[in-house]
Amino acid sequence: MRTYPKIIISQAMIDEAKNRIQNVKVNRTIASKIDTLTGILGEYAFAQYFYSDWRKNRVGANKGEVDFDNIEIKTSAFPFRDTLNLLVREDYAQKRKPPFYVQIIIDVDTRNANHIEAGTKAIIAGWASHEEIDQAPLRDFGSKLGGKGGYRCFYIPINKLHEMDNFEEVYKEYP
């Protein structure tokens, strides 16, 4: 059975993320009321996992760019299950080709959560290359708020992603 690295979201992370929401909000389709907060917390969780310090992030400085050097973080707030998907919007995938996509799931109690509490787990679910994203199927996953999302996403189920145990090694070998 697969195991997934987990980062516990602290109140300090949540407070800092809430302070940054207005500066990093992107004009695009909103899939949930906590979209921007979720994305920021995902970047913090990855920084904690990869650099052992959630403050070593580029939130605010990376608007319109890849989140970390050659790494794009994709974060969703859902009750965790390994049949969830790494989603990359079709329009985003056409504009940018970061070598690595990392999926993080903020493990909330319900798919319609409208807040994230301290103590919630951020699960580092796995990674895929941009080549794998480009080969993935496309689908409109709709909105948590109801109805169609109005855009298609490439998707790869979490249980088909590369495990994180070799990510650092593969990342360091990337040219």
Image: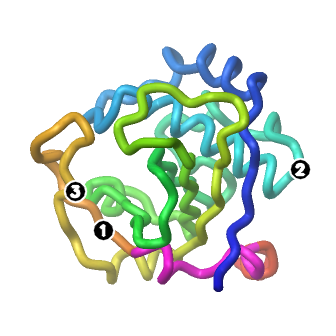
Q: Label 3: which residue?
A: 141
Residue 163 as seen in the image, left or right of residue 32? right
Q: Is residue 25 visible?
A: yes
Q: Which residues are magenta?
A: 157-167
Q: Earlier in the sequence, mark 2 or mark 3?
A: 2
Quarter occupied by the N terminus: bottom right
Q: Residue at x 52, y 37 (%)?
A: 38
The numbered mark at residue 127 is none
For mark 3, give the secondary structure. loop
Residue type highlighted by circle 3: Phe
Compared to 105, does 157 lie above or below? below
Labels 2 & 3 near each other (Cβ < 8 A): no
The numbered mark at residue 52 is 2
Mark 2 to mark 3 CA distance (whole Å): 33 Å
For mark 2, give the secondary structure. loop
Residue type highlighted by circle 2: Ser
Labels 2 & 1 near each other (Cβ < 8 A): no
Residue furthest right as drawn: 52
Quarter occupied by the C terminus: bottom right
Q: Position of residue 25 (x, y in %)?
A: 44, 25
Mark 1: few, some, or many residues within 10 Å (few <14, many ≥20)? Answer: many
Q: Is residue 175 visible?
A: no
Q: Residue at x 73, y 57 (%)?
A: 6
Compared to 78, does 24 lie above or below? above
Residue 119 or residue 174, whichever sits in front: 119
Residue type highlighted by circle 1: Phe
For mark 1, give the secondary structure. strand
Q: Residue at x 73, y 81 (%)?
A: 170
Mark 2 to mark 1 CA distance (whole Å): 30 Å
For discs 2 and 3, the disc positioned in front in the rendered view: 3
Q: Residue at x 41, y 72 (%)?
A: 83
Q: Position of residue 148 (x, y in %)?
A: 11, 47
